Amino acid sequence: MTFLLSLEELNEFQKKESIMAAWSEMDQPMKNFVFLKLLTGSFRVNVPQNLIVKALAD
């Protein structure tokens, strides 16, 4: 989450570079899936945010 929040301070080029670098470091497809969902904000509608955070923490 800290990574995503840090993107706010970057310009578009820096955001793209940071996201591409993070994506290439991930070694499991599920990590890529969750990362994409966090970036796009496309978790299921009506799922409480605290439930998502708890599931990711587990």
Image (tube, grey):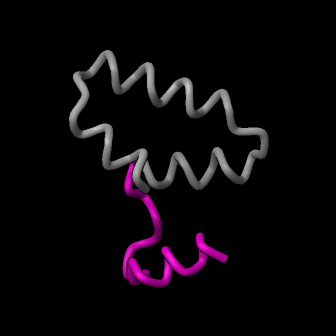
Give the image quarter of residue 16. top left
Query: Is 53 a magenta residue?
Result: yes
Image: 46 above or below 40 = below
Query: Which residue does the image show at 39% across and 74% down from the upper left?
Result: 45
List x then y, in percent, for residue 20. Answer: 53, 24
Q: Is residue 26 left or right of residue 8?
A: right
Q: Which residues are magenta?
A: 40-58
| Figure quadrant of the C terminus | bottom right
Q: Residue at x 21, y 35 (%)?
A: 9
Q: Nearer the viewer, residue 16 or 5?
A: 5
Image side of residue 51 versus residue 58, left or right: left
Q: Nearer the viewer, residue 34 or 14?
A: 14
x%, y% of residue 55?
A: 60, 77
Q: Is residue 3 left or right of residue 5?
A: right
Q: Find out whether residue 44 is within the magenta segment.
A: yes
Total marks shown come to 0
Give the farthest residue toward the right. Answer: 28
Q: Position of residue 3 (x, y in %)?
A: 42, 45
Q: In the displayed structure, would residue 21 be above or below residue 34?
A: above
Q: Residue at x 52, y 46 (%)?
A: 36
Residue 5's x, y, as percent?
Answer: 31, 49
Is 17 placed above or below 48 here? above
